[in-house]
Amino acid sequence: MENFRFMSRFNQWVNSRLYAVVGQLPEEQYRREMGAFFGSIERTLNHLMIVDRMWISRFTGDNTDDIQTARDILHPTFPGLLKAREAMDLYITATVDRLRGEDMDRSYTFVYKTSGTEGTMFGRHMLLAMFNHQTHHRGQVHCMLTQLGYEIPGLDVPPYVRDHPPSSARLYT
């Protein structure tokens, strides 16, 4: 569980740094088609919110009826998306902090909302999928920001650990 707690906090930190750069963009650049999988920074970041909500809802039972596809724009303005992202990152951390070993070893069966197919995964694999998915698409946003000429601060584990040194051999209890 310690590694997942670490990842939830790292995830929040990376998102705050990335969103600080995205917040500097003129709206045209934020929405510009750039050839990434979801096209624009706006659509990529909205996609991440959608998928995070779907993954975490499998632990919490939260309602995701407002999500129709993985390409929805649930937050059409950057300030709205930023507010939702900050709240989601706090929620992810709080949810992960409440999970126990048995939640990680439990098998969850769910329907992939975007395809309608059924899936079954262990809790630990669902969290791995969520955090890996974040990393994958944040890398695309990083690339788009770089193409637009923006400088991005370090988004990797070493700068995080440097800025958030553990107080003991165990990071989180």
Image (spheres, rainbow, N blue to C red):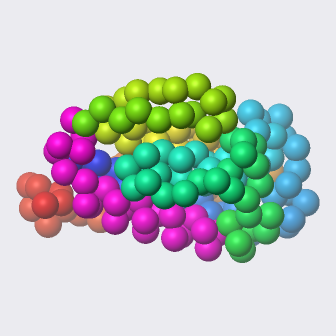
**Which of 23 and 101 lies nearest the eye of the viewer?**
101
Query: Where's residue 38, x and y in %?
Result: 76, 39
Name which quarter of the figure residue 23 lies in: bottom right
Residue 40 in view of the camera: yes
- Where is residue 91 drawn, in percent x and y? 43, 65
Quadrant location, the C terminus: bottom left
Q: Nearer the viewer, residue 13 or 150?
A: 13
Tell me where the magenta segment starts and ends, as one range: 82-105
| Residue 116 found in image quarter | top right
Magenta span: chief secondary structure: helix
- What residue is rendered at 32% in x and 38% in y? 123
Residue 90 forms part of the magenta stretch: yes
Q: Residue at x 62, y 63 (%)?
A: 19
Q: In the image, is residue 89 part of the stretch drawn in magenta?
A: yes
Residue found at the far left of this picture: 169
Q: Nearer the viewer, residue 57 or 23?
A: 57
Residue 62 appears left or right of 31: left
* Residue toward you, 144 or 69: 69
Q: Is residue 32 left or right of residue 144?
A: right
Side of 21 where 128 appears, left or right: left
